[in-house]
Amino acid sequence: MKKLALLAAVAASPAFADQPVTLNFAAEIGGVPYACDETYTGLGATGAEVKATDFRTYITEVAMVSADGTRVPVTLDDTIWQHEGVALLDFEDATGACTNGTAQTNTALQGTVPEGEYTGVAFTVGVPFALNHKDPSVAPSPLNLTSMFWNWQGGYKFVRIDMVPTDRAAEGPAGWFLHLGSTMCKAASKTEGPTAPCANPNTIQVSFDGFDPATNTIVIDPAAVVAEADLRVNAADTSPGCMSFPGDADCTSVMSKLGLPYGDLPAAEQALFVMR
């Protein structure tokens, strides 16, 4: 009888209690905090000077990592910045040169995770395929921003960092844009979503060991990603900067540093996100 009573008590108690977790992010360019009215120097292969007119990214599949390597999913709160496990980090505030942005900003992810001892964090940069190719005009926030959407076929821009060189060459672009999204998505037209995953999903897997949400911040800085790119010029007959599409010479030194293969070039360790 005592054994049965003990079992009943155990069954009545919650197996796992949830604890809140907040992951803080910061945006920088070349180690300088991001701001819409800031000018950044010494960027890229030619040490370009730029204004950064947009800085946003989608995050999903957030997990805390236990000491044995187990990834425990974080349940993100449902807010205007988070929906169905997808969050938007938005560092621009629509001031200065950030004319395509919004006044509101968001620099943290918030949710809950089962109580436990965690020594790391992991997440994916991107939007899940099931949500990536729907109509943003009827989608809930934060998936309702058409400025973060290519078209139904390609889906969302997982990363949008827009830089405008102030000292561009005569033949240079009006802007040098780092836009990451899925490419080679088979669909009948740009206004229809694919029924099968894209050939190049272009989602970035990020993880950090020794991460403590109470003391560590995840910094997003494109300087290392564009270190070998000339931000003052643009490859002929291509989109300004690197927009992830195959065959763009401006992407050859960039995509691998996002942790992604590009054509015949293998992926390297991603350099966009660092822990501090």
Image (spheres, rainbow, N blue to C red):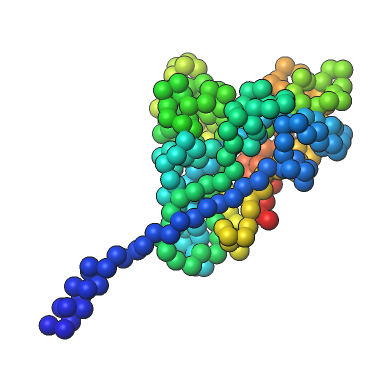
* Residue at point 53%, 42% (across, down): 59
* In this rendering, position of residue 163 left or right of residue 158: right
In front: 172, or 164?
Answer: 164
Left/right placement of residue 108 relative to residue 265 reads left
Counting from the top left corner in percent of width and height, residue 10 is at: 25, 72
Residue 271, percent from left and from top:
69, 47
Give the image location of residue 158, x and y in percent. Answer: 57, 34
In the figure, 6 relative to 102: above or below?
below
Q: Is residue 250 visible?
A: no
Q: Quadrant of the N terminus?
A: bottom left
Camera-side residue of 94 and 26:
94
Q: Quadrant of residue 100?
A: top right
Q: Residue at x 62, y 41 (%)?
A: 260
* Left or right of 185, for residue 47: right
Q: Residue at x 49, y 55 (%)?
A: 21
Q: Give the x, y percent position of residue 231.
A: 80, 29
Vertical side of 167 occupied by 88: above or below: below
- 27 and 209: which is toward the camera: 27
Residue farthest along the bottom direction in this orientation: 2
Q: Tell me which residue sits at (49%, 33%) in the image.
A: 142
Residue 30 lies, with reference to residue 239, above or below; the image says: below
Q: Is residue 125 visible?
A: yes
Q: The C terminus lies in which quarter of the figure?
A: bottom right
